């Protein structure tokens, strides 16, 4: 609906942070915590536009700029420094951007100067996330049945450093898969069409673990990994969250 809101659990209510006056249908969001992105909310929409909102002033830091000609599916701020962020889009492109290259006025925006790296895929990309360890590796999920790990610090950015074969054809009725990192950045998690999830080694792409259960009767497509404990939450479109626990 063009609003950005913050949940206040103590009051059980949402606080309005930003109102785009119905000019944007937001499709992706992330929050910066350090560096140039501290106190900033990153918003992207179905048309490929990007806004950065100052959470304290509750207004956009600059006019909207276009990063893609198609819907942006995810936006993620690099967690260790906060100066870079990446976007994935339906246009089959994943890009890494330098937030410091975005001027205070959107009219002076230079897409070429702000782009750090571009990772071209053959089909739509549904997810792109930086590794938590500050290595600047980017994990992408593509409809071409592959998960990829790209290294922004390498000179050759045309090929992923790790390429994992994984069925990403979720069809019409299941939310597209979005692979995520394990907290230690040594593994990645993604749902399967067999009503389970796979954990792959990030360095080699080798499948390490498959988790499933007779209680998991729908395909899980969204995941959350506990930051310190071996627990993974798997969410399905049926409205349930299933917890898988390993050995600590």
Image (tube, helix red, strand yellow):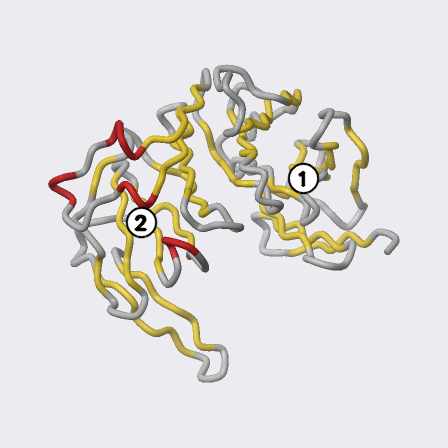
Name the residue rendered at 71%, 29% in the picture: 203
Per the image, the residue denoted by label 1 is: 189
Q: Which label belongs to residue 241? A: none
CB within 8 Å, label 1 to label 2: no
Where residue 21 appears, x then y in whole percent?
16, 58
Per the image, the residue denoted by label 2 is: 26
- SS for callout 2: strand
- SS for callout 1: strand
In front: 185, or 190? 185
**Label 1 crowding class (10 Å Cα cut-off): few <14, some 14-19, many 20+?**
many
Where residue 45 appears, x then y in whole percent?
29, 44
> Residue 46's image quarter?
top left
Quadrant (top left/top right/bottom left/bottom right) for the C terminus: bottom right
Quadrant (top left/top right/bottom left/bottom right) for the N terminus: bottom left
Side of 188 where 38 appears, left or right: left
Name the residue rendered at 41%, 42% in the picture: 85
Side of 196 where 72 appears, left or right: left
Where residue 64 appears, x then y in whole percent?
19, 46
In front: 139, or 199? 139
Where residue 58 appears, x then y in whole percent?
25, 67
Q: What is the distance, in whole Å, between disc 1 and disc 2 at their CAs? A: 25 Å
Q: Earlier in the sequence, mark 1 or mark 2?
A: 2
**Label 2 crowding class (10 Å Cα cut-off): few <14, some 14-19, many 20+?**
many
Name the residue rendered at 54%, 30% in the picture: 141
Residue lying furthest right in this view? 247
Name the residue rendered at 45%, 47% in the picture: 77
> Residue 33's image quarter?
bottom left
Side of 47 where 33 appears, left or right: right
Q: From what the image shows, is residue 91 above or below residue 51? A: above
Residue lying furthest left in this view? 107
Q: From what the image shows, is residue 12 above or below residue 167? A: below
């Amino acid at each position: 609906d063009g609003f950005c809101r913050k949940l206040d659990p103590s009051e059980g209510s949402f606080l309005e942070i930003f109102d785009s006056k119905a000019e944007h249908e937001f499709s992706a969001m992330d929050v910066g915590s350090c560096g140039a992105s501290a106190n900033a909310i990153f918003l992207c929409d179905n048309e490929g536009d990007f806004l950065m909102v100052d959470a304290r002033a509750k207004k956009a830091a600059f006019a909207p700029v276009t990063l893609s000609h198609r819907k942006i599916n995810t936006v993620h701020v690099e967690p260790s420094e906060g100066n870079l962020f990446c976007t994935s889009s339906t246009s089959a492109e994943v890009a890494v951007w330098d937030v410091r290259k975005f001027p205070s006025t959107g009219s002076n925006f230079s897409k070429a100067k702000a782009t750090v790296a571009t990772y071209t895929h053959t089909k739509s990309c549904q997810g792109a996330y930086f590794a938590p360890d500050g290595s600047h590796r980017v994990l992408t999920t593509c409809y071409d049945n592959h998960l990829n790990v790209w290294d922004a610090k390498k000179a050759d950015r045309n090929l992923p450093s790790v390429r994992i074969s994984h069925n990403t054809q979720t069809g019409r009725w299941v939310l597209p898969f979005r692979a995520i990192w394990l907290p230690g950045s040594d593994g990645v998690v993604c749902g399967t069409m067999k009503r389970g999830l796979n954990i792959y080694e990030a360095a080699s792409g080798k499948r390490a673990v498959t988790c499933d259960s007779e209680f998991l009767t729908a395909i899980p497509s969204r995941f959350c990994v506990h930051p310190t404990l071996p627990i993974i939450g798997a969410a399905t479109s049926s409205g349930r969250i299933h917890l898988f626990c390993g050995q600590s």
